[in-house]
Amino acid sequence: FYNPGTIDTIYTFDHCNIRTKAYATYSSLNNCIVNTSPLFFDISSDSYELMGSSPCIDAGAISILSSDIKGEIRPVGLSNDIGCYEFQ
């Protein structure tokens, strides 16, 4: 999202990986990973699957979704991974 600072808007983020500027303020960052690389497998080839050392693994919220975008079972670990791919 982009807020040029001219609009008074309140954002709430929950269980996400977010990159932000130091001066940005939010009403709520709940269980978020801030300014840390998600460690995607190979973004130069448009592969946004997570590497085994990604901080996004097991950092998502439990949801009603029982599979990821590829149809793989989720969650595999303690919780869902952040993003559309579950690390297998």
Image (spheres, rainbow, N blue to C red):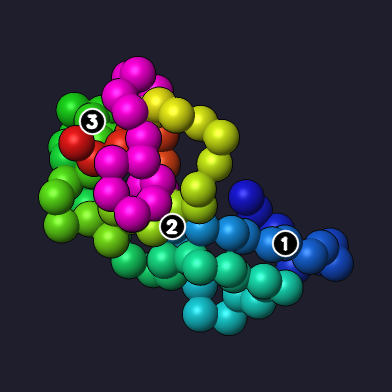
Location of residue 62 with respect to 71 vertically, above or below: below
Residue under the point 17% across and 40% down = 41
Q: Give SS at disc 2.
A: strand
**Pointer 2 local density, CA inside 10 Å: few below 14, some 14–19, many at least 20:** many
Residue 76 is inside the magenta segment = yes
Residue under the point 59% across and 59% down = 14
> Is residue 67 rendered to the left or right of residue 14?
left
Spatial CA distance of label 2 from label 1 is 14 Å
Q: Give SS at disc 3.
A: strand
Spatial CA distance of label 3 from label 2 is 17 Å
Residue closest to the eye, 74 or 46: 74
- The chief SS type of the magenta part is loop
Q: Give residue 20's position: percent from left, percent from top.
A: 50, 67
* Location of mark 2 (residue): 17
> Is residue 64 rendered to the left or right of residue 88?
right
**Pointer 3 local density, CA inside 10 Å: few below 14, some 14–19, many at least 20:** few
Q: Give residue 2's position: percent from left, percent from top.
A: 64, 53
Residue 17 is inside the magenta segment = no
Could you tell which of marks 2 and 1 lies nearer the N-terminus?
Answer: 1
Q: Give residue 19's position: percent from left, percent from top.
A: 45, 62
| Quadrant of the drawing holding the C terminus | top left
Q: Amino acid at mark 2?
A: Asn
> Is residue 33 rendered to the left or right of residue 76?
right
Q: Amino acid at mark 1?
A: Tyr
Q: Give SS at disc 1.
A: loop
Q: Which residues are magenta?
A: 69-82
Spatial CA distance of label 1 from label 3 is 28 Å
Say whether marks 2 and 1 touch (CB < 8 Å).
Answer: no
* Location of mark 1 (residue): 11
> Is residue 48 rendered to the left or right of residue 63?
left
Residue closest to the eye, 75 or 49: 75
* Location of mark 3 (residue): 47
